[in-house]
Image (cartoon, rainbow, N blue to C red):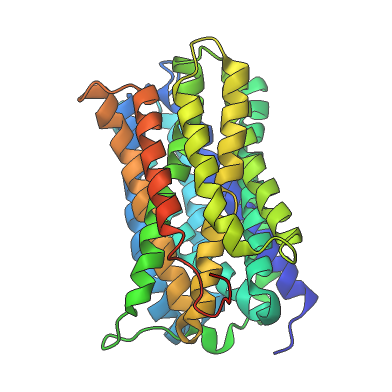
Amino acid sequence: MTVSRGEIVAVYAAGIVQGIALVTFPAASAIFTSPAHYDLSSEEYGAMFLPQALTAIGASLLGAGLGRRLGAKRIYLLGLGANLLAMALLVVSQFVASAHALAYVILLIATASLGAGFGLTVPALNTFAAVFFPRTIDSAVLVLNALLGLGTALAPAFVALFVDLGRWWGLPVLVALLITGLLAFSLGLPLEAGGAVAGPTIRTSFPARFWVFAAFALLYGVVETMNGNWATLYMTRHLGASAGVASLALTMFWATVTAGRMLFAAVATWLPPHLVYRGLPFVCAAALVGTAVLPRGESSLGLLAFALAGLGCSALLPLTISFGQREMNTIAAAVAAGLIAAYQVGYGVAAFGVGPLQERAGHGLSTTFAGTAAIALAMAALSFFVRPVKEGSP
């Protein structure tokens, strides 16, 4: 199929914008838990992401089926619209922040909308990347996810900037403007995914191999979210860092996620992706253990630990998706959607589960980071089974 430059620009630009939108809420964690703003407890903050996980899972699973009837372009546009609604609700919530219950309900609806947007948009973007570049699927998906990672790295930096200006809500306003522009640009493009939109029907289930990939994606979701959602609170509460340094830690995590994806895409010709895939979980485990044992006041070491964690996480999810799509290419869109759903299950476990562990079970974030290292080691073991059967390597 012939692909226009405009289609490529739209898809890869959408990766950046989706990344910024995705991290807008965790990047503003200090605002949500501050008594001067929303005054959420750790448990309320964690629970805020449960609707996001649930709607992302539902949207991912429904998206492949809807794609057969509506087309990949409409699914992508619906996802952008849901992201836009989430940003609008976040802006509205700050006007009623003093009414705790009302503001919290609006935040829950906003994260639910963001989850739906993520669940619809990201599988569509991964499918577009695979279809646009069928001969270099691994690299195409890695680059797309690197740009998504670039967006996630920009979000905490933007939050820190807008907080310094006394207008923290400037970030959701900025994201809303970017989404609006992207919607206007994308409407006139064909954005076709061909036969890749096909997926399992009601009578057809995923093959058994899919569930190995899904298990890896779930475990990865826990590891990534432990860093992505709890880094700033860990830096401020355990390491005594300022809000600015805590935002920098999150920026460094997502920046090295992005840099790692670009690096591994660039060196794929001489460093086979399956070797990268087997090694990175060990990097995640080392970073998590390092984070857990940091003494109070060592915020500079915290920055390095989260940067290492980002490198460890970098290529794992994109490669899981591209490996799965290449192996199960007749249901590529359904595979991408199913793996995003599995990832979101892990996201929900880490985003929601850490709060109760702290406030009810008495486990500190240090203990939780250390426990998550065991999940990273489980990923390392599973990585030897998650690879395309077409690969000739052992």
Is residue 368 toward the left or the right of residue 252 in the image?
left
Is residue 6 toward the left or the right of residue 332 in the image?
right
The total number of labels drawn is 0
Q: Nearer the viewer, residue 189 or 203?
A: 203
Q: Is residue 1 visible?
A: yes
Residue visible at 61% across and 39% down in the picture: 155
In the rendered view, would you say 181 is above or below 370? below
In the rendered view, would you say 378 is above or below 336? above
| Quadrant of the image occupied by residue 216 | bottom left
Furthest toward the left, the residue is: 360
Q: Nearer the viewer, residue 202 or 291?
A: 291
Q: Position of residue 350 (x, y in %)?
A: 36, 41
Q: Position of residue 386 (x, y in %)?
A: 45, 66
Q: Position of residue 228 (x, y in %)?
A: 50, 38
| Quadrant of the image occupied by residue 274 | bottom right
Is residue 122 toward the left or the right of residue 341 in the image?
right
Residue visible at 62% across and 63% down in the picture: 273
Q: Position of residue 373 (x, y in %)?
A: 41, 37
Furthest toward the right, the residue is: 5
In the rendered view, would you say 131 is above or below 77? below
Quarter of the picture containing the N terminus is bottom right
Residue visible at 36% across and 50% down in the picture: 346
In the rendered view, would you say 153 is above or below 322? above
Residue visible at 54% across and 9% down in the picture: 297
Q: Is residue 166 visible?
A: no
Q: Nearer the viewer, residue 312 or 132?
A: 312
| Quadrant of the image occupied by residue 98 | top left
